[in-house]
């Protein structure tokens, strides 16, 4: 698919009373495809990452 070869990094940054969790994505396409990469990032990767992070938050707050 369009995200084949994408590098994904999860990070967990502990704070005083919480942990910040995030996802970094590195999608490297040839410059001629730069516009398509933006569309894939905003229309596909971003929404899925957002749902994943929201679900992790729900589970963590529920103690699961």
Image (tube, grey):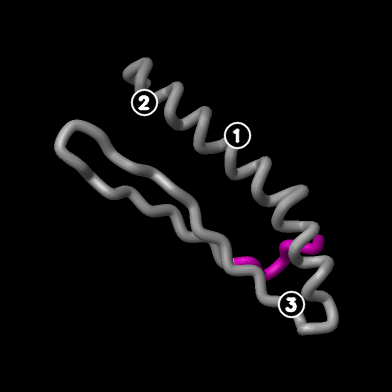
Q: Earlier in the sequence, mark 2 or mark 3?
A: 3
Check disc 1 and report its element: helix, strand or loop.
Answer: helix
Element marked by disc 2: helix
Question: Of the residues under marks 2 and 1, which one precedes in the sequence?
Answer: 1
Which image quadrant is residue 47 in?
Answer: top right
On residue 60, which mark appears? 2
Locate residue 59: give its quadrant.
top left
Q: CA distance from mark 3 to mark 1?
A: 25 Å
Q: Are marks 2 and 1 in contact (CB under 8 Å)?
A: no
| Coordinates of residue 58 in the picture (x, y in percent) | 45, 22
Which residue occupies 72% across, 66% down? 4
Judge the density around disc 3: few (<14), some (14-19), many (≥20) Cα neighbours within 10 Å. Answer: some
Q: Earlier in the sequence, mark 3 or mark 1?
A: 3
Quarter of the rendering occupied by the C terminus = top left
Taking the spot 32% from the left edge, 48% from the top edge, the residue there is: 12
From mark 2 to mark 1, how far is it between C-alphas?
14 Å
Q: Quadrant of the N terminus?
A: bottom right
Q: Report the side of 29 relative to 51 (left or right).
A: right
Rendered location of residue 15, percent (x, y): 20, 42
Query: Over which residues does the magenta segment extend?
Result: 1-6
Tell me residue 45's x, y (percent). 68, 51
Indicate which disc residue 41 carries: none
- Number of other residues with Cα within 10 Å of mark 1, as a class: few under 14, some 14 to 19, many 20 or more: few
Label 3 close to label 1 by CB (< 8 Å): no
Please, which residue is most extreme toward the left here? 16
Say above or below: 20 vs 60: below
**Residue 29 marker:** 3
What's the magenta bit mostly, secondary-structure-wise? loop
- The residue carrying mark 1 is 51
């Amino acid at each position: 698919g369009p995200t084949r070869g994408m590098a994904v990094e999860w990070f967990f940054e502990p704070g005083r009373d919480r942990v910040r969790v995030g996802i970094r994505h590195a999608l490297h396409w040839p410059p001629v495809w730069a516009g398509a990469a933006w569309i894939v990032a905003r229309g596909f990767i971003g929404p899925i990452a957002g749902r994943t992070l929201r679900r992790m938050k729900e589970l963590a707050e529920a103690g699961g």
